[in-house]
Image (cartoon, rainbow, N blue to C red):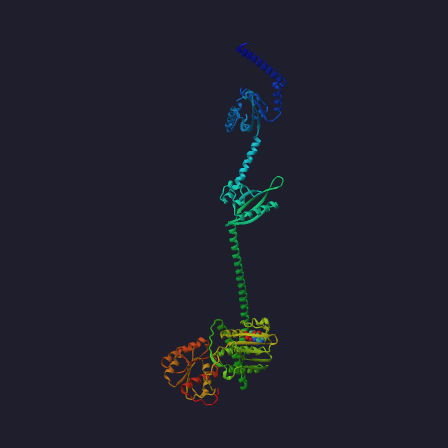
Amino acid sequence: MSSDAGYENLKQENTALQAKVEALQHEIELLRKSFLPGENFYKDRFYRINENVNDVVYRFRFKERQYEYISPQVQKLFGYTPDDFYKNPAIIRHLIHPDSIKDYFFHWRNIIVGRIPEYFEMKIIRKNGEERWVLQKNLAIYNERKEIIAIEGIITDITERKITEQALIESEAQKKAILNNLPHLAWMKDLNGVYVSVNESFARRYKRSVEEIIGRTDYDLYPYDLAQQYRDGDLYVVVNKNQLQVEEKTDDTYWETIKAPIFDNSGVVIGVTGVALDVTEHKKKEETVKAFSEKLAVQNVKLKLINDELKLAKDKAEEADHLKTAFLANMSHEIRTPMNAILGFASLLRDRKISESKQVEFINLINSNCRQLLHIISDIIDISKIESDQISLFNKSFHVNRTIRSLKQNFENAIKQQNKDIDFQEVIELSDENDLIISDKARLEQVLSNLLSNAIKFTESGQVQFGYTCNSEKQEIVFFVSDTGIGISNEEQKIIFDRFRQVSSSYNKLYGGTGLGLSISKGLAKLMGGSIRLQSELNKGSTFYFTLPLKSGNVVKPEKIAFDTTYNWEGSTILIAEDEVANYTLLESIILPTKAKVLWVRNGVEAVDQCLTNANIDLVLMDIKMPDMNGLDATKQIRKKNNTLPIIAQTAFAMPQDEENCIAAGCDDYLSKPVQIDEILSKLNHYLRNKKSITQVPQKASH
Ligand code: ADP
């Protein structure tokens, strides 16, 4: 056999074998198919199952563009029957909502090119126009050649879910909007302190974006100490499962922060949420209000003090008013008593024929009552002068021992007159050679007299001592008046130096007095640079101390001026200028026993005329208040022509200013009314002796 023949044989055998294989394959396929369920086996079951579910199930033959099957639920969903779909498969396109039509075609295009999306959502419009949302799931069915032969799918109505979802989205958006619009900083952190959410206020505050903060911790955002402080707060909230409210300050900002735990459904803490509010403005306002309140409180206290002061002032004014009324009543009594005696005895002297001895007695009584009256008037003038600060002192040197002795003599008489059983003693410390002090003698006498008359007044029997001691250490001279009388209670000691004050009205009645003496004494003591105080015990007695400063030089050498009480001015002529007859008569009666010649004029014009024409006049006693021309003007007129004639003013104007006015007008000296006889005589003697060196005879003037 040739090779060609061999090849041809092989080829035929091969073809025969191939035919056999194909036949076998066909037989196998037939056999396999005979074991498989029939074509409608699955279909029938599948359709039956689908009829019982709510979703729409379909099978769409891809090539034919025909629904092979669509479940009856389609009517419920779309409003069209399966038949409507079988007849017009394109009906579906008209049911897609315009919002979803783009997506729908996009998905179909993908299906055509073999990119089957697992599912997609779209909006449809039902036959009745109602809008609904559906979810379409598709499955492509391929043939052996990998060609799509059908699309099987399910359409589920998801409208309810979509509505819920939309609501959720909207509520989330609202929450976010609320949180972002809040002035509060709001945040959430997990258990590790990592920010999981913050609002825009928070981000703005730290000049970062929300995204930049989320995922970070406080340690990334703040200095270590501050971050640690925040972390401690978070841990407190986590551990205690409780809220934490703190007030914090960062830079110049005050924060009020509330932190709270976040729980999961099972109550386990999974993080911390917080809100912080910038309360700086509030704080500032609070501080302003606080400062204001404090100011108000201070103001209140001040007002209260003012109120108290006003109340005190009112009480004092009321008390002063009351005291004044009591004082006036008392004063009226004090003045009327001596007035009564004066007027009574004076009318007795005029109207009745009475013996000479009785006349003397009455005159003495009138005299002593007049002095009492004068004392009251002096007191009133003194207190008003002290209160209006009008008292001037006339400090001259004088012998303090003599003052004490003279007071002793005066008050010894008073004790005798009052028939009191009082042991009265004086105490002096300086020797008579060294007892000159410089002070206002009259005022010192006034204070001591006040104290002495009180001591005697308030001591029925017992002892009264007065005098002075020197405290060289303190450079003081301490006058004292002590008695063993009724004494003064501690309470009363506080008030008796106030004007018009007396211990009690019953004492007033018993003892009399105006309640001015101590007040005047205290005022004078102060004016003289000293002070007055007392020690007293009720029913045991009192000691008043009156201290004066004894500055070096206060004790001075004596200026020897000796006046005798007997005068003979024979040959001298004295002119009395006085408009009141009684006053002239008194002066004349005092002067005539000295054998001097007395001339009388009744006004200033006459006085000037006499002085300038009568060269015999040696001295003038010039009244100040006179008709036509007063004493001051008259003196001025005289002084224009005669500068040597002694002119002594005598006036009832008893203020210090009056003395100064007299001296300024040209008077040489001054005598205040009521005149003291001794004082007049010694003064006149002084000027007359200097003028004419008149011889004094040792003969007592019989006035
Ligand atoms: P007056 O004696 O005129 O009443 P004073 O001012 O001198 O006024 O005295 C005031 C009061 O002080 C007296 O009324 C008296 O109650 C009381 N007082 C003063 N001195 C004494 C004293 N030595 N002993 C007891 N009481 C006194």
Quadrant of the image for the N terminus? top right
Q: Nearer the viewer, residue 604 or 618?
A: 618
- The picture places residue 445, in percent across and down from the top left corner, at 51, 79
- The picture places residue 661, in percent across and down from the top left corner, at 42, 76
For the view shown, which residue lies furthest in the top direction?
A: 1
9 vs 424: above or below: above
- The picture places residue 97, in percent across and down from the top left corner, at 52, 27
- The picture places residue 320, in percent across and down from the top left corner, at 53, 68
Number of numbered callouts drawn:
0
- The quarter of the picture where residue 598 lies is bottom left
- Residue 576 lies left or right of residue 48; in this view the side is left
For the view shown, which residue lies furthest in the front direction?
A: 1
For the view shown, which residue lies furthest in the left direction?
A: 641
Q: Nearer the viewer, residue 115 or 135?
A: 115
232 vs 534: above or below: above
Q: Nearer the viewer, residue 161 or 240?
A: 240
Report the image quarter containing ligand 1.
bottom right
Q: Nearer the viewer, residue 203 or 181?
A: 203
- The quarter of the picture where residue 635 lies is bottom left
389 vs 265: above or below: below
Visible residue check, residue 630: no
Visible residue check, residue 424: yes
For the view shown, which residue lies furthest in the bottom direction?
A: 698
